[in-house]
Image: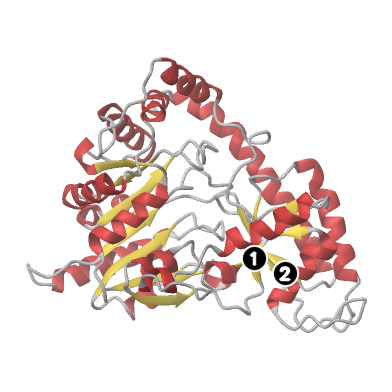
Amino acid sequence: MSTPKLSHLAETLSGSEIVKLGNAISERIRNGEKIYNLTIGDFDPSVFPIPTELEELIIDSYRNRNTSYPAAEGVLDLRKSVAAFIKEWEGLSFEPNEIQIAAGGRPLIYTLFKAIVDKGDKVIYGVPSWNNNHYTHLTDAVHCVVECRVENDFMPTVEDIQKNISGATLICICTPQNPTGTTLKKESLEAICDLILEENAKRGEGEKKCYLMFDQMYWTLTYGTTVHHNPLQLRPAMKDYTIFIDGISKVFAATGVRVGWALGPSTVIAKMKAILSHVGAWAPMAEQKAVAQYLLQKENIQRYLSHFKSEVELRLRNIHDGFIALKQKGYPVDAVAPQAAIYLTIKIDLVGKTTADGKKLETQSDVTSYILAEAKLAVVPFSAFGAGANSPWYRLSVGTCKKEEIGEMLEKLESALSKLSATSY
């Protein structure tokens, strides 16, 4: 029987590459293999639980029967608490009507695209980056892809955007970035903001403006001397053109709690609300009520973040140091020093090597499969984030990493590397 014809979108949409990889890994685990699964941008609750106070507030909220539909824009208590939280922690001022609540960041990004981007509009985004390619496809927009490089921390440069900004509708920036764990420098963000302001000044009154989607879901998770900057601090005039994507998913290891928020011009936020009201992707009422209370508990948040960040950073630095030690031994691997988020950018450059059983690693996909089979290490290639299929760079996530297993994981990786033909070691 032939497959029935569906919509053009359905026929052309590709599924999540990370989910596909995750399914393959789950199958191996079900078959009894021990896999160091460092693929998913999520947390093992046994390693990184949500804050105890937030957990208790959620339980109490259900006991208080907060189980009805929330307001389409989010309950007012939560929007006021988000405004207070952002003011206290980032110095940004937003009114409740400039805040939209949803079930995490994904529905907010989707509705932002749908509110701003028309078919044929140009969307600028760097690769690797998380899902911008899919959201651009969902809106039938024109992909304006910027190939980012390690020397720029895999961030788009001012020159990259300047070459493409004419006629663009949306620029997508995530900092700290998924998948790289790197951040956009202050000077670069200032210059990009200036480009957007200059471009919008050229456009007529009835002409669509160029907007910036500023995904800062990981902004609290910075390490060492890394500082997170945002457009409004640097260029206040950007408030008319910037939509923030934010929430509790990563800052409180609360990916499954599903509470996110967008901050932006009230006109854009109102249209996002209208679209979400048809989609129904609201954060649950009980969780909204609980988060509204928790966001005001500054001392508890500080205590949680102090411990949480130190544990994440410990894992990132230990794995980074292990990769650098392997590099110094002559193996073709590398790693970018940790800056932020829960990700480490690593390089595994084995194409052309030959395995112990005589098989040549012809492609980067072969390398990924070899590392999974021989080292039991599962990481996500940058090709899953829009980069080229031949990119030797990977995202390694520590959200499910047990620190006591880091040493043995690195030993297995070295053993796998040592079994390859020593053509350049």
Quadrant of the image occupied by residue 39: bottom right
Residue in front for this viewpoint, 313 or 115: 115
Disc 2 residue type (three-letter): Thr
Is residue 156 visible in the rendered image? The answer is no
The residue beneath circle 1 is: 394
Q: Is residue 275 above or below residue 299?
A: below
C-alpha separation, residue under disc 2 versus residue under disc 1: 9 Å
x%, y% of residue 155? 48, 67
Residues marked 2 and 1 touching at CB (< 8 Å): yes
* 376 left or right of 147 in image: right
Disc 1 residue type (three-letter): Tyr
Indicate which disc residue 124 carries. none
Q: Is residue 347 above or below residue 295?
A: below
The residue beneath circle 2 is: 368
Helix, strand or loop at label 1? It is strand
Q: Is residue 354 above or below residue 37?
A: below
Q: How many marks?
A: 2
